[in-house]
Image: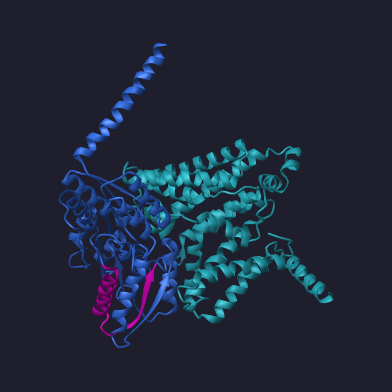
Chain colours: A cyan, B blue
């Protein structure tokens, strides 16, 4: 008893010392990194670090925005489909309509936000559980991507600085540009959720909707804004992927929604709303990429990797809950 | 009143017209359904084109359909749907050795002939297989690897979905050829999932883990494209040889630039075209369908320009 109390006190002191609200998930990420650094000589190299972050970029942008939405008390299972629609609309606008790629990207991003607005309206006006509502729109949106593209990928784009700026260039010849997009999105979302009255309203809406309403917060409006933010993030992530790969497919982003939710939960976001942080989700996304890449570096058999990733996700959540002293996720 | 009468007349006209047009269509045209297990992947574009052009040439209706992403249960439903429509023949991919047994039996028992296309399941009782032998294609890849790396060495064999029957057969084919070189080759299988960003990252990591690697080879479009991206991005041309499967834009562009060495083409246009021809000849003249090997055609720097031209038109 005494020991447990002492160690809990120690952790609390550590948390105060470093000012981390996300101590648990950072600890999990560092533990995993330490393990892989000891077992693989190339894990702790700049190449691998940037490789990891590059892989994290698209998912991270979506997962951090999804965190804002989950904190507000809703989910969006349609982000993967919105990710596909954005890519397909952008690709077709420039390939088939001959529009400038920048204009096409604006068009793509606008369609993403339109779909996000529809999600928000559907959930707030009908009061359908967002899990079901966005499961339905996921299928509709995926269908739109399929119909528009006739199931075919769009590729062979003309050269344009667009691709370098969104996903191909390396800043200072070292840092992949999509990492800057990831960090920029992170900063904007962090500021919005943790430093503005909008953020306060988001937490209030997810924590206790009735109380928030009584306090004069229009929770429906807050949630609609969160759906819009999430969709815009999915759109941006899609453009970053388009810049990097110079190709779009109507099936891209399949399961993106689940990975985004998983990353948010690893990062300490509560599935029931009201609790969560952008930094936590950022690290959560990093952990998922860290594990996958680490297993490849170790030379793990291809057939056991998925099982390991699942195990580590479970472990990371447990460590996070224990260390941060939360009751449940 | 008059409006109600109008509606009634319209309804009556429809009722009379529907069966009549149906009967007329049946009298002059055969209808065949071509189903693939993932209609949204670029690979199947020429299959569809081949099937539709064969239909146009022979004067029969060809419907191309299937689930957009790999889903055997949904694919079986598409086949059942075709059976319910009482079509004159079905050509479908069978990417599982046993999952199609029942539905093929059901179709055949109702007098609807079924062919396997692109991916075969002999136990299903299908009449014939039109496509590439995946194991043989994998061997072909293995022989290309041996030709490119006569000294042997460490290589990566990459696959997007571990456990997918047809892809595993290719990996096995390549492994068997490499194993037969007397231990000169050491290989590692890397599974990436179908997301290309992740594939690029993971294969890049596998290379980082072992810089002695002399070659990276993907047994389908996703990992092939990913390998082309890595060799170009990390400037590995000359250090690492790359190869892929099927005619994918990124891989072909890589062969042209010299970052990729080869890709194995299975001529999918032929798979679509020949399936419809066989179904048509069976329906019309009772000619028994037979297996057709659509070939193992390596594409290298020598023929890439001509092949790319045809690919742009949807024939390769």
Q: Is residue B147 magenta?
A: yes
Q: Which of B100 and B309 is in front in this view?
A: B100
Mark count: 0
Q: Which of B65 and A28 is in front in this view?
A: B65
Q: Name the spot of residue A25 as percent of width and height, x first.
A: 65, 66
Q: Which of B62 and A34 is in front in this view?
A: B62
Please indicate whether residue B114 sits to the left or right of residue A3 in the image: left
Please indicate whether residue B199 sits to the left or right of residue A234 in the image: left
Q: Name the spot of residue A113 as percent of width and height, x first.
A: 50, 42
Furthest toward the top, the residue is B1
Please indicate whether residue B70 sits to the left or right of residue A55 in the image: left
- Is any atom of residue A158 visible in this view? no
Furthest toward the right, the residue is A2
**Quadrant placement of the C terminus of chain B:** bottom left
Which residues are drawn in magenta?
A: B133-159
Q: Name the spot of residue B54 as percent of width and height, x first.
A: 19, 49
- Quadrant location of residue A172? bottom left
Residue at 66% from the left image edge and 60% from the top image edge: A268
**Quadrant placement of the N terminus of chain B:** top left
- Quadrant location of residue B232? bottom left
Residue at 68% from the left image edge and 66% from the top image edge: A23
Q: Is residue A13 magenta?
A: no
Up the image or down, A67 lies above or below A54; here it is above
Residue at 41% from the left image edge and 61% from the top image edge: B196
- Is any atom of residue A81 visible in this view? yes
Up the image or down, B298 lies above or below A329; here it is below
Q: Which of A257 and A237 is in front in this view?
A: A257
Q: Name the spot of residue B149 as percent of width and height, x first.
A: 27, 80
Furthest toward the bottom, the residue is B182
């Amino acid at each position: 008893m005494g020991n447990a109390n002492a160690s809990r006190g120690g952790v609390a002191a550590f948390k105060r010392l470093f000012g981390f609200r996300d101590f648990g998930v950072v600890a999990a990420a560092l533990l995993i990194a330490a393990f892989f650094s000891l077992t693989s000589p190339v894990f702790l190299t700049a190449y691998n670090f940037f490789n990891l972050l590059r892989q994290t970029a698209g998912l991270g942008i979506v997962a951090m925005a999804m965190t804002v939405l989950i904190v507000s008390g809703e989910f969006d299972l349609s982000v993967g489909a919105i990710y596909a629609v954005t890519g397909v609309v952008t690709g077709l606008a420039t390939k088939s309509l001959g529009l400038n790629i920048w204009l096409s990207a604006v068009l793509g991003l606008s369609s993403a936000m339109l779909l996000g607005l529809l999600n928000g309206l559907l959930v707030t006006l009908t009061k359908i559980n967002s899990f079901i509502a966005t499961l339905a729109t996921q299928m509709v949106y995926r269908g739109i991507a399929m119909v528009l593209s006739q199931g075919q990928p769009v590729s062979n784009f003309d050269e344009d600085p667009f691709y370098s700026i969104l996903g191909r260039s390396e800043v200072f010849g070292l840092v992949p540009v999509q990492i800057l997009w990831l960090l920029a999105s992170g900063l904007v979302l962090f500021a919005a959720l943790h430093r503005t009255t909008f953020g306060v309203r988001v937490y209030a809406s997810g924590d206790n909707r009735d109380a928030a309403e009584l306090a004069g917060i229009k929770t429906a409006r807050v949630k609609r804004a969160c759906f819009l933010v999430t969709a815009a993030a999915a759109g941006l992530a899609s453009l970053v992927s388009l810049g990097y790969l110079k190709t779009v497919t109507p099936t891209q982003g399949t399961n993106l929604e689940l990975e985004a939710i998983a990353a948010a939960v690893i990062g300490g976001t509560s599935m029931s709303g009201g609790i969560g942080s952008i930094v936590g989700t950022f690290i959560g996304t990093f952990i998922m990429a860290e594990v996958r890449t680490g297993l490849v570096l170790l030379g793990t058999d291809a057939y056991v990797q998925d099982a390991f990733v699942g195990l580590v996700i479970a472990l990371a959540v447990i460590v996070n809950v224990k260390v941060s002293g939360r009751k449940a996720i | 009143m008059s409006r109600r009468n109008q509606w009634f007349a319209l309804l009556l006209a429809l009722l009379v017209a529907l069966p009549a047009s149906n009967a007329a269509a049946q009298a002059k045209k055969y209808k065949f359904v071509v189903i693939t297990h993932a209609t949204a992947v670029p690979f199947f574009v020429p299959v569809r084109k081949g099937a539709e052009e064969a239909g146009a040439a022979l004067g029969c209706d060809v419907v191309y359909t299937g689930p957009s992403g790999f889903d055997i249960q949904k694919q079986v439903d598409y086949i059942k749907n075709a059976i319910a429509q009482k079509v004159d023949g079905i050509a479908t991919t069978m990417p599982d050795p046993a999952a199609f047994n029942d539905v093929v039996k059901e179709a055949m028992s109702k007098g609807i002939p079924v062919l396997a296309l692109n991916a075969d399941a002999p136990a299903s009782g299908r009449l014939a297989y039109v496509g590439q032998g995946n194991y043989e294609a994998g061997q072909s890849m293995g022989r290309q690897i041996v030709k490119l790396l006569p000294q042997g060495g460490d290589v990566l064999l990459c696959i997007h979905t571990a456990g997918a029957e047809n892809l595993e057969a290719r990996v096995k084919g390549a492994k068997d050829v490499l194993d037969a070189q007397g231990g000169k080759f050491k290989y590692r299988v890397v599974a990436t999932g179908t997301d290309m960003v992740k594939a690029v990252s993971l294969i890049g990591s596998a290379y980082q883990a072992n810089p002695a690697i002399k070659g990276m080879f993907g047994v389908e479009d996703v990992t092939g494209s990913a390998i082309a991206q890595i060799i170009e991005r990390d400037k590995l041309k000359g250090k690492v040889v790359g190869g892929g499967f099927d005619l994918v834009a990124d891989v072909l562009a890589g062969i042209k630039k010299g970052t990729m060495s080869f890709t194995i083409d299975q001529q999918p246009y032929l798979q679509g075209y020949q399936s419809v021809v066989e179904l048509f000849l069976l329906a019309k003249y009772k000619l028994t369908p037979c297996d057709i090997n659509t070939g193992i055609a390596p594409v290298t720097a020598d023929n890439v320009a001509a092949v790319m031209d045809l690919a742009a038109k949807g024939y390769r």
